[in-house]
Image: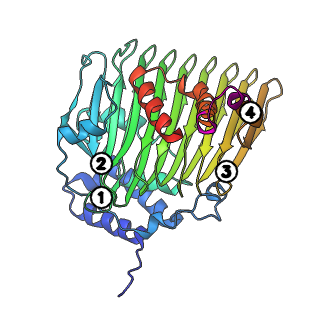
Amino acid sequence: MTTETIDLKSELISDFRRREQAMNGEAGTPFHQIRQQALERFETLGFPTPRNEEWKYSNVRNLVSHNYNFSAKHQVSSETIGNISIPNLTGNVLYFVNGQYEAGLSSIVSPAEQISILSLREALEKQPELIQMYFNQLTDNQNEAFTALNTAFAGNGVFIHIPKGKVVEEPVVLYFINDARIEDIGAQPRNLFIINENAQVTLTETFLTLGEAQTFTNAVTEIYVAEHAHVQYYKVQNASDNAYHVGTTQVRMADNSHFYAATVSLNGGFIRNNLNIAIDGEHCDAHMYGLYFPDGRQHIDNHTVADHRKPNSESNELYKGVLRGKSTGVFNGKIFVQEDAQKTNAFQSCKNVVLSPEATMNTKPQLEIFADDVKCSHGTTTGQLDDEALFYLRSRGISKDEAMNLLMFAFCEDVITQIKIEPIREYLEGIITQKLA
């Protein structure tokens, strides 16, 4: 028996060169030049190791020891899709399976004058000016290897453009599903959302898997929030124990804009979420909520950045985790208050309950202030269940297991209640109830 050593980096670079040779004219476009530069940067950076401070607690060794099929075909029926989708969640619903947009399974219900929804490939043909103006402007390919890798292979994903003053009443729901019933699957969705002045929209990204083979998702989303725009953004992860996910969401906010994010990680073998918000305008408010439930040997890592660049804005952040089994969790939250960002209010909190002696939580709140007239706070707590509260409930005739579940659900509730879409909130409550049972 022989053991083959996989060099995923070399495999991906070779794949890029093969695709490049097969291009017919596209290789000379400005868009592809961006991809070439990103590939060269990835080639230099390579995959991060724990020696990289930003990846100190998240070792991707197992992730990169597999070779994934990034072009796998699939035969997923609408019935199968329906069985794993969030019940009763309607609106503009788009499905991506193994990274490929599935128009036949998707439904766009909002009128075209309210919102333009295209695949990234379509947008390259129909909206080249917007792509040139906005694509890859927020991402950090110089220092982030996974982002550079995603940029190099950019082509699959969603382009959303909302004109000035338009209020999109129906939510946009994006499902990214890896069909791993036969083989190891890889996907690198790249999304670009442009929300113009005075526009409003609710966006949801949901990541799921079919089957138990290994999967690797490397997702990057850029979100531009213009003046007086309102954006609600939800990210839900309920993948298999063999699913590896690295996701980066880059946001830039303009004057008087509002951005609200909730990230809920229900299941997945290895999850790394990067949520970076540049508050690049005055009188903005940014809210970040997170909830995660690693169990078994799962690993969930949340990195957040609130970068205050202009005065008179506010950011508020609350992340909560429940850890069981031999799982590990990471929270690394950074608040930057730049020199010009006077009158900033910035608050950050991370709270965790560890239910197993073998589970581990690593937290690293960071606050860097370069202005002198600000109100900022940050802090984290990690501990066990409240013994007094548990004793009180048991003294009322409630069993230990039921009392623990009640306390844990109450612990999660102040994040769950921030979910404004009822079907998503009910879906989360159902799964969380099962997890706590």
**Amino acid type, callout 3:** Met
Examine the rendered structure and indicate whether residue 105 appears above or below residue 164.
Answer: below
Proximity of marks 2 and 4: CB atoms separated by less than 8 Å? no
Give the crowd class for mark 4: few <14, some 14-19, many >=20 residues within 10 Å. few
Q: Is residue 384 above or below residue 204?
A: below
Q: Return the x and y of residue 18 as percentages of the image width and height.
A: 26, 66
Identify residue for label 3.
Answer: 361
159 relative to 322 in the view: left or right: left
Evaluate if marks 1 and 4 touch, with contact meaning CB atoms under 8 Å apart: no
- In the rendering, which numbered label is found on residue 391? 4
Q: Residue furthest front?
A: 397
Q: Amino acid at mark 1?
A: Phe
Query: Residue 70: which numbered mark, if any?
Result: 1
293 or 247: which is nearer to us?
293
Q: Please, which residue is most extreme toward the right here?
A: 372
Secondary structure beneath dot 3 equals strand
Q: CA distance from mark 3 to mark 1?
A: 32 Å
Q: Is residue 289 above or below residue 97?
A: above
